[in-house]
């Protein structure tokens, strides 16, 4: 994630829910590895809207509440696999 291609191992996704949820350094109660949103270079940004907070409900009733954000997201280590403005949920 991000233009530095930080590898994220612990994400929450569900094919029935349109949101990818990522634990970030903003989370004070998260355990394990988190994505450092302050790391350079800064490609991470929050949506500039009054309704940026969102709750996503996943299979089994799991819910995640966070802030809608945009950042680079890549599925491989090559830049051709990256989306530069992917909207996801900062948990």
Image: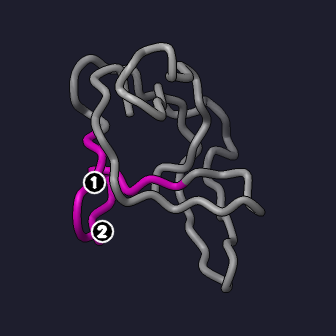
For disc 1, the neighbor class at 10 Å (few under 14, some 14 to 19, many from 20) is some
Looking at the rendered structure, the secondary structure element under dot 2 is: loop
Give coordinates of residue 59: x percent, y percent: 69, 77
7 inside magenta stretch: no
On the image, numbered disc 2 is attached to which residue?
A: 30
Residue farthest right in this picture? 16
Residue 58 vs 2, above or below: the answer is: below
Q: Relative to 13, is 57 on the left or the right?
A: right
Question: Looking at the image, which is closer to me, 1 or 53?
Answer: 1
22 inside magenta stretch: yes
Q: In percent of the image, x 67 and y 84: which residue is there?
A: 61
Residue 23 vs 4, above or below: the answer is: below
Is the residue under label 1 in contact with that under label 2 (CB below 8 Å)?
yes
On the image, numbered disc 1 is attached to which residue?
A: 34
Quadrant, the C terminus: bottom left
Task: Give the CA distance from mark 2 to mark 1.
Answer: 8 Å
For the record, the magenta segment spans 21-36
Question: Looking at the image, which is closer to me, 49 or 8?
Answer: 8
Looking at the rendered structure, the secondary structure element under dot 1 is: loop
Residue 20's label in the rendered image is none
The image quarter containing residue 30 is bottom left
Q: In percent of the image, x 27 and y 64: which residue is there?
A: 28
For disc 2, the neighbor class at 10 Å (few under 14, some 14 to 19, many from 20) is few
Q: Relative to 48, is 34 on the left or the right?
A: left
Q: In percent of the image, x 51 and y 34: which residue is there?
A: 46
Give coordinates of residue 51: x percent, y percent: 69, 46
Q: In percent of the image, x 66 and y 63: which residue is there?
A: 14
The image quarter containing residue 27 is bottom left
Q: Relative to 23, is 83 on the left or the right?
A: right
Question: Looking at the image, which is closer to me, 48 or 19?
Answer: 19
């Amino acid at each position: 994630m991000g233009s530095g291609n930080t590898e994220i191992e612990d994400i929450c996704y569900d094919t029935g829910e349109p949101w990818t949820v990522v634990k970030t350094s903003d989370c004070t109660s998260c355990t394990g590895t988190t994505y450092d949103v302050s790391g350079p270079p800064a490609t991470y940004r929050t949506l500039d809207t009054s309704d940026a907070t969102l709750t996503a409900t996943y299979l089994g009733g799991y819910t995640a509440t966070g802030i809608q954000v945009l950042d680079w997201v890549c599925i491989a280590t090559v830049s051709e696999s990256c989306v530069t403005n992917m909207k996801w949920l900062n948990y």
